[in-house]
């Protein structure tokens, strides 16, 4: 064991908050994640800043709201100037390292404007949203515009899984009795095993790569924050044996949906109901075919996390490594007549979040559950505080979770969480004839009330206490005008906040106040006597 | 005459909108500026994004609101990643050149994070908010923390004005009968001539330097946007002969103020009334001593602009150069019991703005006056459209003024202007015990109603139609609840806007929509038949 502290930050993609044994799923087996929860704190009210990969991750990686960093949907580049978690940790001597997915799209125009060559060390780092890319793999390599030749494809070829696109043809396809390839993208194939053998699947490979990094990092004195970012259980919903038939239709929970929801849905919600993925997941045969695969993918991740924990223990790192397990957003899986994510119902906007802090100060909270209102942007300041004992509130808009982990009295905590939705890339924009820049919705939730402000459209409102399943939209109910006004006001206060004064701290501003006289700037003085008098009276730091 | 187009963008510092002959001042002589107005359009409702140098200028130079760029007060660095007017023009082959003041403070931390050496060409440009600094001089060089040795000091020494700090000792000081130096910072000396002789004053020197640049630029094929940015009539209020006694107490207009304003002022306003500069300018002897000097400084600028226009004409550039005359904010000069600027009364937040467009298409508007609601951030898109026939609405938050200059039908124009005030550096913050980040006010004005939202405090409201002098604060008047609610809603809409999605245009987003199938990402398909069908039906660009 060493004194060096590390962070292992494990992220799944599209993992629902409630698809874990420890979160109460009746038949899903996740013993290793449950064991992690027993060693740490499980947060039951953790929300993402936007329920879709790109913007959600950019908020995780910058510690800033989508409104602040501007990458409002997938494939919208994070501006090159945005400071990242990697920058903040690097300044404290900590390596920030990536194995897996970020969904980052590099701001090449911005880099060119700033004279930054994407091939240099700093260029690579900016293009990878602040990480040192030990293994970058966004986990989507169809025969399209994505990276045509990731390292994982070479790995597959080296292990006998040859082909033009081994990712697509082996790791994410099945085959029929005649050896014909069946695309894993297609939901009808979700019950078949992936062609790749399990030890060479993506989840196995990325876990191996994380261990490779950890082994190599032993020769380096610097502490690290390793972001192990799995693509699964995200699409394609296909998993190798034995996980493909570990679960069956009997394990599929009934969809959380109601006919009431289809009577007069909010226009954006109504449009999402008509999306292909929603229509698919509203069919029982799709849910019964896909959800067992989804669960198999989760149990597979769990097994590899068990392997990883054993490795950490063997390396003597378990007691110095803060371990985080989370996801970038959820998955409707047919709840609310929807598939995929993006909107603000609980299965989409809430995420699993478990943090196991090895510090003895955290002993009091081990195995506990916290219902504090947590946002994805809280992780960056948590890590910074863990390593450096401080945060950067002028840049990082989240709050460190350390007091929750160490059982400290949390005297002041946020009263609500915010999430954002940009539906400009979806048919809802054209259906509703909305301008691109105003195809936006904001969620504000105080734990009980969830209010959704939709630009140019009516709002939504749910009472999570009387209606935890979110079937009854009170957005137009005159009886709840006060709640809507209160939450709208809070949203207004949030939107007015200073989001971009990232170059100076509040403390620096307070210290600068009144510095003009000290600097020789004499504003408002009639004559020498007044200046003399003021110089005599001046208290350092006091405004004049 | 050449086909090459240029922009000459002249900015004064702290020049009130109404201190020009053409703006109706009864005794102030500004014949050259008046002549420029006769050749162009004079805008009577031009507002700055914040009535103080630093943030106002950062908005001018980025074309973005203070809420977006984050440099909320003087000496708060503009983040290194913020794109500037200079960047946008450079991409079109146009040089963006500075002679004079910007009040930019470089974001050295941000540059270091991005690996940008401040000594390189790009580093210098970023440190100068996008300009190529032909002559950078912020015009404040007291014996304090400012640049101790600007080029102007060497120039003064070369011309016989020797000393440790010639800027302070010669250009901004007077002397008494015994040759003792009298600081120009002190208001009691404002009626004395500066020690420097006029042709070597700052205004003269900067005008000379602008001409030097224009001469040198003839050898360069690139068009230019030259920002000639005078420090005057900003403090120190002192001017060389013969301007020091060109105006006298008889030229001083009575202060625009009323006892009503002192009865129950808004708490922030009340605190500003107690600032030293406000107490000073509430005294008649101060106004009578200072305002004639302020007027002399303006007439001096006017004379040098006459010299500059003659030069442009002689160089054959007058007919290809778009000329802008403006200021970064106003000056209370004792109106409303205030000195300086920062708050939102008209003398502080409104600026003079004259634009003379040489294009024949602008002939119809020459000599006209426009009362359109204009913001400082409109200049950047105006210049970009002038040079390149397009703007960048995803980055530039203002609107091009070209239609107003060319007499085109302006079918859609903004309904209100926004300005912001950060009083964290002022005693108002400590007086009112406000947190630094919430020592903020927002103004929204629709031309008739001016509403001021003050974080955590009551709002202000003025009816500019019935009360053009802004004596009656209707912020608490129950009769005007509707106006306040309407303007508050509009401010909320503004604050929710997408301010930071600068890496992609709305058109690019619309074109990307529905691109998943084309990219091989098959989300929601049950089997091959569905994919086949979708591929057949797909219209390019249409969401699926």
Image: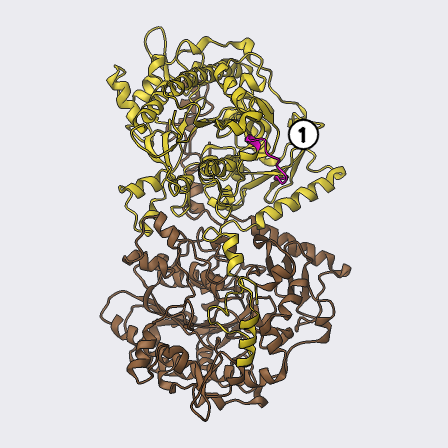
Chain colours: A brown, B yellow
Nearest the viewer among B384 and B45 is B384
Give how far across and how far down residue A13 sits, in percent: 47, 72
Quadrant in the picture for the N terminus of chain B: top left
Residue shown at 50% from the left, 68% from the top: B516
Task: Using the image, determine if residue B203 lies above or below residue A517.
Answer: above
The kind of secondary structure the magenta stretch mainly shows is loop
Does the magenta run of residues contain B405? yes
Task: Using the image, determine if residue B158 lies above or below residue A466.
Answer: above
The residue sitting at the left extreme is A219
Residue shown at 55% from the left, 13% from the top: B252
Q: Tell me the quarter of the picture where residue A149 sits.
A: bottom left
Drawn side of residue B44 relative to residue B124, left or right? right
One can see residue A140 in this view? yes
Does the magenta run of residues contain B124? no
Nearest the viewer among B181 and B61 is B61
Quadrant in the picture for the C terminus of chain B: bottom right
Mark count: 1
Q: Tell me the quarter of the picture where residue A482 sits.
A: bottom right
Task: Using the image, determine if residue A48 lies above or below residue A288.
Answer: above
Within 10 angstroms of label 1, few (less than 14), some, or many (20 or more) residues?
some
Nearest the viewer among B418 and A147 is A147
Indicate the chain on which mark 1 is placed.
B
One can see residue A92 in this view? no
Q: Tell me the quarter of the picture where residue B271 sits.
A: top right
Give how far across and how far down residue A161 sits, in percent: 34, 84
Which range is magenta? Answer: B404-415
Nearest the viewer among B234 and A149 is A149
On the image, numbered disc 1 is attached to which residue? B464
Assign a secondary structure to mark 1: loop
């Amino acid at each position: 064991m060493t004194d060096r502290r590390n962070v292992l930050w494990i992220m799944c993609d599209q993992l629902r908050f409630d698809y874990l044994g420890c979160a109460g799923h009746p038949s899903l087996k996740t013993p290793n994640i449950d064991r992690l929860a027993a060693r740490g704190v499980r947060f039951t009210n953790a929300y993402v800043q936007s329920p879709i990969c790109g913007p959600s991750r950019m908020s995780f990686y910058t510690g800033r709201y989508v409104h602040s960093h501007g990458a409002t949907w997938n494939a919208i580049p994070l501006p090159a100037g945005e400071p990242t978690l990697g920058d903040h940790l690097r300044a404290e001597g900590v390596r920030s390292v990536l194995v897996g997915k970020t969904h980052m799209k590099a701001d090449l125009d911005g880099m060119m404007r700033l004279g930054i060559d994407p091939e240099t060390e700093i260029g690579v780092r900016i293009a990878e949203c602040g990480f040192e890319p030990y293994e970058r793999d966004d986990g989507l390599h169809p025969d399209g515009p994505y990276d045509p030749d990731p390292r994982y494809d070479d790995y597959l070829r080296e292990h006998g899984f040859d082909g033009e696109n081994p990712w697509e043809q082996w790791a994410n396809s099945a085959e029929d009795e005649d050896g014909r390839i069946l695309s894993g993208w297609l939901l009808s194939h979700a019950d078949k095993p992936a062609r790749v053998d399990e030890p060479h699947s993506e989840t196995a490979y990325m876990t191996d790569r994380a261990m490779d990094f950890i082994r190599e990092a032993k020769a380096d004195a610097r502490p690290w924050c390793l972001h192990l970012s799995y693509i699964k259980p995200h699409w394609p919903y296909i998993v190798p044996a034995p996980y493909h038939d570990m679960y069956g239709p009997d394990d599929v929970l009934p969809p959380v949906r109601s006919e009431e929801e289809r009577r007069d849905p909010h226009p954006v919600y109504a449009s999402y109901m008509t999306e292909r993925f929603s229509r698919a997941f509203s069919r029982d045969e799709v849910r019964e075919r896909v959800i067992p695969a989804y669960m198999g993918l989760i149990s597979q991740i769990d097994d590899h996390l068990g392997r990883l924990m054993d490795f950490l223990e063997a390396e003597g790192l378990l007691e110095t490594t803060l371990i985080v397990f989370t996801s970038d957003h959820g998955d409707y899986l047919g709840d609310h007549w929807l598939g995929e994510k993006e909107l603000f119902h609980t299965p989409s906007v809430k995420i699993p979040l478990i943090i196991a802090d090895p510090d003895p100060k955290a002993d009091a909270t081990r195995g506990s559950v916290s219902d504090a209102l947590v946002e994805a942007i809280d992780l960056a300041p948590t890590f910074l505080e863990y390593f450096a004992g401080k945060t950067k509130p002028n840049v990082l808009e989240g709050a460190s979770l350390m007091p929750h982990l160490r059982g400290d009295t949390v005297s002041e905590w946020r009263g609500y969480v915010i999430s954002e939705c940009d539906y400009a890339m979806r048919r809802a924009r054209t259906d509703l004839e909305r301008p691109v820049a105003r195809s936006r919705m904001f969620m504000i939730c105080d734990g009980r009330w969830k209010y959704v402000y939709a630009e140019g459209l009516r709002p939504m409102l749910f009472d999570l206490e009387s209606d935890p399943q979110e079937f009854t939209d009170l957005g137009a109910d005159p009886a709840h005008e006060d709640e809507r006004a209160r939450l709208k006001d809070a949203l207004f206060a949030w939107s007015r906040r200073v989001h971009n004064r990232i170059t100076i701290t509040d403390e620096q501003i307070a210290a600068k106040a009144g510095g003009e006289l000290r600097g020789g700037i004499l504003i408002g003085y009639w004559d020498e006597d007044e200046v003399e008098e003021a110089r005599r009276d001046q208290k350092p730091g006091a405004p004049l």
